Image (cartoon, rainbow, N blue to C red):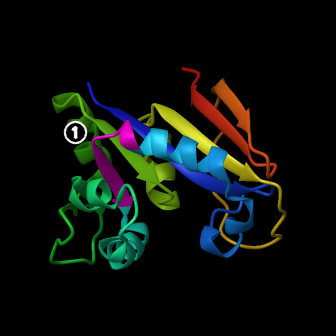
Amino acid sequence: MGKITVSMYLSLDGVMEEPGDWHMPYWDDEMAKFQSDVFYANDALILGRVTYEGFAAAWPKVKEEGADKMNTMPKYVATTTLEEPQWNASFIKNNIVEEVNRLKRETDQQYLIYGSGQLTRTLMEHNLIDEYHFMVHPVVLGKGKRFFMEQGQRGLKLAGVKTTTTGVAILSYQPSE
């Protein structure tokens, strides 16, 4: 059975939108190591269209450590608008819940989701996420797209806590059911 892990930057008020604009002042060696460990523990990415487009535009130009793996690992992209898969991607155009559930059932791969809020919320509603890593930054943005929107109550159990020298709380959770 496959496993799906989510890794997401959040502000204290739950904003996930455009982290490149606010998270970099908090980046440090501890966060880099954590992100590297999570990334290398996975076999493939599952991404929403917006995250995929941003990554596909940037990563092929990157020369630093991890770029080879990022550029060659399989990517499963939830999209109804994109037509031509590139960057080692396969598009999931129909029932995302059914397709992701099939991936989990038919493989033993480890899948990683970066950001991709709507996709993550959809999979969360159907109990398809196995682990969450929320990197909560010590900043209140006051506006922007929030990860936890109008969802029903969801119980999670704490699986780990780390704090970085810049004040980011790395909170790891698993579903409580």
Determine the residue positioned at 83% across, 70% down. 142
Task: Estimate the x, y position of residue 128 in percent, counting from the top left.
Answer: 40, 36
Task: Estimate the x, y position of residue 125 in percent, counting from the top left.
Answer: 49, 42
Quadrant occupied by the N terminus: top left
Quadrant occupied by the C terminus: top right
In the rendered image of this protein, does residue 64 appear above or below residue 34? below
Determine the residue positioned at 43% across, 68% down. 51
Task: Estimate the x, y position of residue 91 in percent, counting from the top left.
Answer: 20, 63
- Asked whether 42 falls inside the magenta stretch, the response is yes
In the rendered image of this protein, does residue 81 appear above or below residue 37? below
- Asked whether 111 falls inside the magenta stretch, the response is no
Q: Which residues are magenta?
A: 40-47
Determine the residue positioned at 52% across, 59% down. 117
The amino acid type found where label 1 is placed reads Leu
Q: Which residue is mark 1?
A: 103
Is 142 left, or right, of 48 in this rendering?
right
Determine the residue positioned at 28% across, 30% down. 2
Residue 164 can be seen, yes or no: yes
Number of numbered markers: 1
Is 22 left, or right, of 109 in this rendering?
right
Q: Residue 130, located in which quarter of the rendered image?
A: top left
Between 113 and 95, the one nearer to me in the picture: 113
Task: Estimate the x, y position of residue 30 in percent, counting from the top left.
Answer: 65, 44
Furthest toward the top, the residue is 177
Q: Residues within 10 Å of mark 1 (few under 14, many from 20)?
A: some
**SS of the residue at dot 1?**
helix
